[in-house]
Image: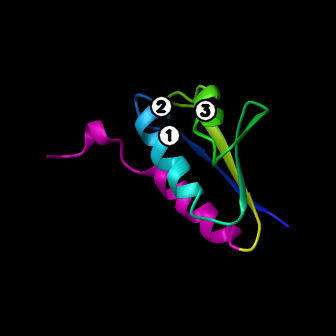
Amino acid sequence: MSVSSSVVITDPLGLHARPAAQFVEKARTFASDVTLDKDGTSANCKSLLSILKLGVTQGTEVTVTASGDDEQGALDALLALLQAEPEAERSP
C-alpha cells in the first residue's frame, strides 16, 4: 500500500538546489520508497539529480508518494518541507 498527496510549490525559485538538497536529505531518513511526480514524470526523492531534473518551478503542482513501513511519516515530513515558507520571505 502507499500514501500520496499533492501540493503546489510556492517558493518563487521553485525546488532549486538548496531546498532540493534538504528535501532529498529528509527523504533519505525514511525506509519507505518515495517519489515526486510532476506532469506525469516521476523522480526518486532520495536522488538529488533526479529531483533537480524535474525542473519544479513556482506554481507547479507536484505529488509525493510514499510506500513502505514508515510511509505516513515520510509523506508528512516531505510535504511539510514543500509547504514551508520560502527562505526569501522569512523575516530576519
Residue position marked by numbered label 1 in the rendering:
20
Three-letter amino acid code of the residue under disc 3? Leu
The kind of residue on which mark 2 rests is Gly
Residue pictured at 77% horizontal, 68% vertical: 68
Residue 7 percent location from the top left of the image: 59, 46
Camera-nearest residue between 17 and 36: 17
Please tell me whether residue 55 belongs to the stretch shown in magenta. no
The prevailing secondary structure element of the residues shown in magenta is helix
Q: Which residue is mark 3?
A: 49
The span shown in magenta is 70-92
For residue 13, above or below residue 48: above
Query: How far across and down, in percent of the image, does residue 49 sit?
Result: 61, 32
Q: Does label 2 or label 3 sit earlier along the sequence?
A: 2
Give the mark nearest the N terminus, 1 or 2: 2
Of residues 6 and 69, the one nearer the viewer is 69
Q: CA distance from mark 3 to mark 1?
A: 9 Å
Say which quadrant the N terminus sits in: bottom right
Left or right of 92 on screen, residue 85: right
